[in-house]
Amino acid sequence: MKGTHLGELEELVLLTTAVLDGAAYSVTVAKEIQEVSKRSITLSTAHTALFRLEQKGFVTSYVGGTTKERGGRRKRLYRISKAGFAALNEAMSVRNTMWQRMPKIAFDI
Amino acid sequence: MRPKKRRPPIWADKFLRWYCADQFFEEVQGDLHEWFYIRVAEQGIRKARIMYFIDVIRYFRTFRLKTTTKVNNNSNYLFMKNLVKLTFRNLRRNGFFAALRIGNLAIGILVFLLVVIYASYELGYDKFHEDHERVYRISHGISGNPWAASPVGLGPFIMDNSTSVASMTRVFPVGENWFKKDDITFKERNGHFADSAFFDVFTHSVIQGDLKSSLIQRNAIVLTADLAQKYFGKENPIGQTLKSGQDDGKERVVTAVIENVPEQSHLQFDYLLPMSTFNERFSRAWRNLMAYTYIKGRPGADFSDMKEVVLKEYTTRYGGRGGNPDEAEILMVPISQIHLKTNYEKELADNGSINYVYILLSVGIFVLLISCINFINLSVIKGLDRGKEVGLRKTIGASKNQVRAQFIGENFIVIFISELLAVISLSALSTIFRNFSGLDLPLNALESLNVLGLIGLLIIGLTLICGLYPAVVLGKFKPAYILKTGGQGGLRLGRLGLLRKGLIILQFGISLVLIICSMLIYNQLDFIQNKDSGLAEDEVLVIPLSNDVRSKFQAFKNGLEEVLGIKSVTTSSHIPGYRIMVEGLKEVGIEREGSNLTTRLLLVDNDFVDSYGLEVLEGRDFLEDVPDKAVEYLINESAVNYLFEDRDPLTRKLIWKGDTGRVVGIVKDFHFESLHNTVEPLVMSSNTRWSYASVRFDPKRKESVMAGIASLSNEVYPDLPSVEYEFLEDRFETLYLAERKLKSIVWSFCLISIVLTISGIFGMATYIAKTKTREIAIRKVLGGNTSHLFGLMSKGFVQLLVIGTFIGVPSAIYLTRWWLRGFAYRVPIGVGIFVLASAGIFLLVLGSSGYVTLKTAKSSPTDALKSE
């Protein structure tokens, strides 16, 4: 198993996967990220991130249904796993700790 | 159906189809299509189509490629992966054995590589010259005495009389010389006169100037890079002048600068002067054997005509003088063979010897062989451990060949690691090897393609030799038997197979040969050093007389005799320890048919005999005051019979070059050459043509003598650098330099081979003891004592040792006899050496196997028996 470090983009994708709750695949993830963060990410970036997250065990995937737009092709849907959720929590708590440690003065900048 | 236009581009889809692995394809294409229609809605069809293609390209990542997944699932790849993993697992599990196997082989390979690099270096002399196979040195031999030097006139004669020669150059040493630029003066010893065609015959790369015309002008000089740097620094030397000692301080103009002469050349020089320095008469004279004549033949030329013409010329020129013309021969040596295959009179350099190259090469191969044998034996014995693994593999369906492939692969990896280790240590230790050999060996494997090739061949060769046999043996395991009994699959451990027994015998034999040979070399050198040479070489120092020193020599000599600690000073034409000239002599009143007898001839003054501590057996020494420079002769014992047969020498007269004189005495034979040769007939003539001064001193006052010479030299020659001298003892040491080097090399190889053999034995003994732990324990319980167990365990090795001795000793006798043939004076080969060497190896083997046995035998038997 590869390292389980959570990169910045991966964290974002993982969060999105959690938000989409079972309906996450590269198209929806890319769209959601574009909408929320105004940051444009390509399909392939989203797919690669999902693939790596799956290798790290943070998401699980299953083959889902088809839609007309896909020309009858099945899609692979991703869902956050327990480990993924723990990793997100961990990331958040690290950030929170850091925020709390920040001296007041920093807000004046 | 959708209108065609609203579809994503088909060719982009095709590309995706082409590269994308099946497991991703459906998902990815679906996603892409969905995205495409979103784009169409937002940005229009044109842009969506372009973006679709860009997205397809963006998906191009290694993990999605078809080939990647194919490779990942390819059975060969899986096999390799599994093999590497298993190999390292096994190596780690048996750290000691792994280290033993790898270290063993690495040492063997290291020694082998070193030796091969050395040999190819020695064999590569003078091969950097273009068309070197067409370049020959021409000289002659008379009465079986071959010469490297030839008459000055030989070269021009060949050019006038032969059409098969394209170009010719003579080379002859300038001798002591100095150059002066402004106020810097250096002595330069290493220069040659050369013909203008020098650079046609030899290939040297030019740095500045024009080589073709560089040696035409009378006052030209060609410098090597180092010398140019020394005198001119960063200035451009071309066209600048140097005052030259050889030309009485006249100036010479630098016409070209060439790269330093490569070390791999017998013809070494720092500068060249043109032959045109001399007049035509000198240049065509046949009197002096002082030039070295090199020719470059035309392609495909036949030289037999030329040889005949030259031989005829020799006969007419030398008929009646110096040797029998019937026995004269013309010698043509390809330049690439001069270094190793010739050692004629007056060689330009101390040449190597092809025999030493062969000796080292075979020793290197022997050491590699020993380490291979260890590797094979240890591999087999270690592999026996893995019976269960093999059994299981076979049960699951592996074929015999698959199991073999597994073991070959493992061995390959181990061999590869050893090789890597050897190559790394080769470059790491390169400074040591270079200093020791005194040669600039190409030891960094990555620098030399040949070495890399050799390493590649070695890996393949060793895998075949060392990897195949263990693999074949281990492939034979019978699965059912192993799995049923947990045993070794019908291969009994304690017993060694016939082949392996043979290998161990061979190993013992080789070690024994190496031990005996190095002992003998040691003895022989010892013998030579302690043999009485008949002269006082440890009490004599020699001053070569350059023109400068000679100019005020009488004053210098008088001063020397005053120095505290100096007993006497003598002058002579040559000195013992260097080659003494060979000349033809005539006996008054005896007409010989054809030619004169040749002997070594020394021109000496009347202090020579005393100064060198020679002993006059019959007659008398030269007189103190010779009336009217009358010449007298002294001969050595060896010359008595040779020159005069049954006539009484003391009543005869000799003539040499018009000097007639009486033979006044006979001196006891002394070794004026190395002990490779017997004492040759020698005649000493009282004559005043000298080029060396020898000083007999009191060895207890060596320091005072050295200081005295230095201050005297300052006093008499204030303008010159201090007079140089050499201790005769040191000169005689250098005569055995090759042997001395050989001694230390063979010693170290011998040591290495012993260490290898012992470590092999140690490994095997450890293993056998381990597998016999229970047997030993049971025997102990039943009352067997330690010495009994020791005997039981060592018996196998002792048998092999005895056979090994029977093979090793005769081969050692044969080899040492062959080597000793190179010496005229040989140390007797006693039984002692053989007994000592055999006993030594017996002790070492018994010691290492005994140590292991004792360790096992001493442990409590309950532990061993409990473990099952």
Image: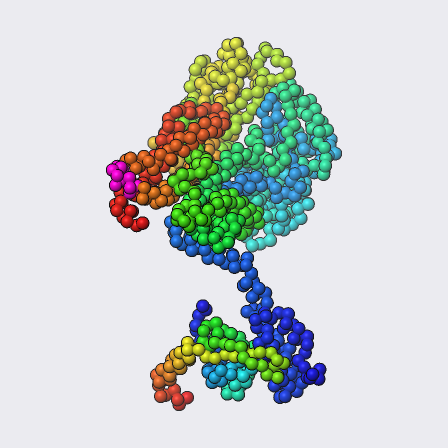
Q: Is residue B74 above or below residue A84?
A: above
Dominant secondary structure, magenta: helix
Tell me if residue B239 can be seen. Answer: no
Q: Is residue B785 magenta?
A: yes
The picture places residue A10, in percent across and down from the top left corner, at: 48, 78
Name the foreground residue: B816 vs B27: B27
Q: Look at the image and tell me in which quarter the N terminus of chain B lies.
A: bottom right
Location of residue B734 with respect to B474 vertically, above or below = above
Residue A8 spot, x, y in % from top left: 46, 78
Q: Residue at x 38, y 51 (%)?
A: B95
The picture quadrant where one finds residue B785 is top left
Q: Nearer the viewer, residue B746 or B96?
A: B96
Q: Residue at x 53, y 88 (%)?
A: A35
Asked whether B391 falls inside the magenta stretch, the response is no
Q: From this viewpoint, is residue B804 visible?
A: yes
Residue pictured at 48% horizontal, 57% vertical: B82
Relative vertical location of residue B560 with respect to residue B462 in this rendering, above or below: above
Residue B764 point in image, percent of width and height: 39, 42
Total number of numbered labels?
A: 0
Write the residue at 54% across / 59% down.
B75
Q: Nearer the viewer, residue B681 or B839?
A: B839
- Residue B709, how many percent across, how many down? 41, 35
Asked if residue B497 is positioned above or below residue B588 in the image, the reply reads below
Q: Residue furthest right?
A: B163
Q: Which residues are magenta?
A: B776-786
Q: How is the image coloured?
A: rainbow
Position of B134 compared to B776: left or right?
A: right
Q: Nearer the viewer, residue A3 or B79?
A: B79
| Residue B154, quarter of the rendered image | top right
